[in-house]
Amino acid sequence: MTPDVGAPGRQVPVRASPMSTSQELTLVTGFLTVIGLSWRWHAGAHGFCPGIDIVDGVLLIAPDARASAALHEAGHLATLPGEFRPYAQRNVSGVQRLICEHVDFAEEPDGDLQRAAIQCSDPEATAWAWAAGQHLGLPPKAIIQDDEYDGDGAFVRLQLATRGYLGINGLAHAGFCAQRPNAYAKARGLPAFPELRFWLQRNFGTPIVGSSSRHGAGLPSAGVRRSAPRDRGLINAASANVQ
C-alpha cells in the first residue's frame, strides 16, 4: 500500500490565496494539495455550495468560501473511483449516472469497484469531510456548521462523533476504514473511523467510452483536458494516486 501522504505529523504546505481567507480554509486547501486532489482559487465560484464549484473534476474555491463547504465538496471528489473523477461537474449527479452506465454490477456485485461505485454519494462525502477535518484538528463547528444540512448541522456532528452516521458504513464498505476499533478492524489492519487508510479512492481502470466530461452537467463546453496537472496550472501533490 502506498504510504499515506496525509499521515499525522506531516506538515501541510500552504499556498497563498489571492485574497484573505480563513485559517481553516487555508488548512483545508493545503491538505488538498498534499493528498493530490486537484483544486484552484476561483473568485465568485458558486455551485451546489456557495463559494465552491466543480469543473472537470477540479474543485474551484472562492477565497471567502466556508471551510466546511470545501471539505464536503472535496469529499465528493475523493470518494469517486479515480477514473471517474475527471468527469465530475458541479453537483456530481452526472458523474454518478456515468458510473452506473459503465460499472457492471451484475457480474461482480460485491467487487472492490462495485463497492466503491455504490459508496460515493452524499453521506460518504459528509463522513469523509468529518474525517479530514478531524485529521486537520479543525473545531467541529468549522467542519460542519449549525445551519448546514437544513439546520441539522449539530445533530450530524453528533452522529459522526459517535460513529452513528450512515456515511461511515459507506466509507467502510468502500475500503477507506473500519467503522469501529474492534476485532474486525484489527484482523484486517484497518484504521477505525475517523482515521482513514487512504484519502482518495483508487483508479480501477474502468474503460470509459462514448462519454463527455460534461456528462449531464449543463455547463458551457470546455472539453476534457488530459495534460498533466502542472500543465493545467492546478495545485497537486507530488503523488496524485494516493492509495
Image (cartoon, rainbow, N blue to C red):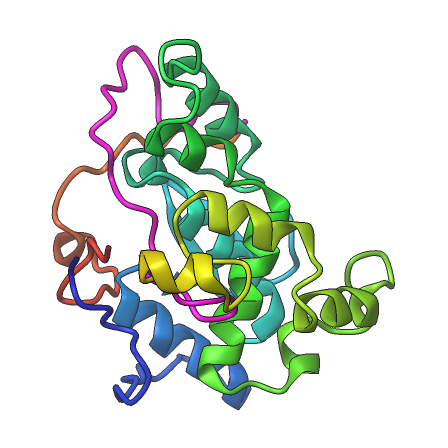
Observer-nearest residue: 166 or 147? 166
Q: Residue 166: percent from the left, percent from the top?
A: 67, 50
Question: Image quadrant of residue 60?
Answer: bottom left
What residue do we see at 42% from left, 55% from top?
A: 59
Q: Quadrant of the N terminus?
A: bottom left
Q: Is residue 2 left or right of residue 111?
A: left
Q: Main secondary structure of the magenta part?
A: loop
Q: Is residue 234 above or below residue 202?
A: below
Q: Is residue 160 above or below residue 111?
A: below
In the orientation shown, which residue stands out farthest toward the right? 151
- Is 193 inside the magenta-drawn segment? yes
Q: Is residue 202 left or right of residue 103?
A: left
Q: Is residue 241 above or below residue 28?
A: above
Q: Is residue 107 left or right of residue 140?
A: left
Q: Residue 199: percent from the left, percent from the top?
A: 35, 60
What residue do we see at 39% from left, 80% from top?
A: 17
- Is 142 inside the magenta-drawn segment? no
Q: Residue 4: percent from the left, percent from the top?
A: 24, 68
Observer-nearest residue: 180 or 218? 180
What residue do we see at 30% from left, 30% from top?
A: 223
Q: Quadrant of the C terminus?
A: bottom left
What residue do we see at 87% from left, 63% from top?
A: 151
Q: Is residue 179 above or below residue 171?
A: below
Q: Residue 192: percent from the left, percent from the top?
A: 47, 67
Image: magenta residue range: 190-218
Q: Is residue 78 visible?
A: yes
Q: Is residue 44 visible?
A: no
Question: Image quadrant of residue 45?
Answer: bottom right
